[in-house]
Image: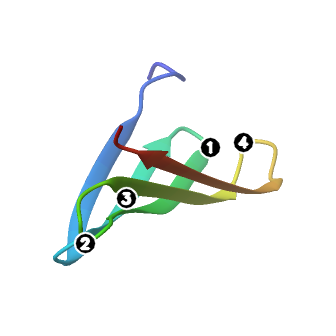
Amino acid sequence: PNPRQATASFRQISPNVWERIAKRPGDIRNGYWAVSRDGKSLIITRYGKDSDGKDYYFNRVLDRQ
């Protein structure tokens, strides 16, 4: 298999929040995508272990202009 090949799945857990799981060989990335109630912000959170076994945490907030 191609080491760059990845799969991702989403599962809606509430009206504005989706759980995301992305998998690559040796790497699983979990996280959440949440849209604010007014629809003007998207919060992306990711966490897990990278292919070297190190913990990571990522959080980004995107605002609609």
| Between marks 3 and 2 in the image, the one whose residue lies nearer the viewer | 2
- Image quadrant containing the C terminus: top left
**Secondary structure of residue under mark 2:** loop
Cα–Cα span, label 3 and label 2:
19 Å
Q: Earlier in the sequence, mark 3 or mark 1?
A: 3
Which tag, 4 or 3, sits closer to the chain's start? Answer: 3
Mark 4 to mark 1 CA distance (whole Å): 5 Å
Q: Nearer the viewer, mark 4 or mark 3?
A: 3
Given the image, on which type of amino acid does mark 3 rest?
Arg
The residue closer to the viewer here, 12 or 53, is 12
Q: Residue at x 54, y 59 (%)?
A: 45
Q: Amino acid at mark 2?
A: Arg
- The reply to whether dot 3 and dot 1 touch (C-beta < 8 Å) is no
Secondary structure, mark 3, is strand
At 30% from the left edge and 54% from the top edge, which residue is drawn? 40
Gap between marks 2 and 1 measured at Cα = 36 Å
Image location of residue 52, percent across then percent down: 81, 43
In the image as oriented, which residue stretches furthest toward the bottom? 14
Mark 4–mark 1 CB contact (< 8 Å): yes
The kind of secondary structure element at disc 4 is: loop
Read off the residue under disc 4.
51
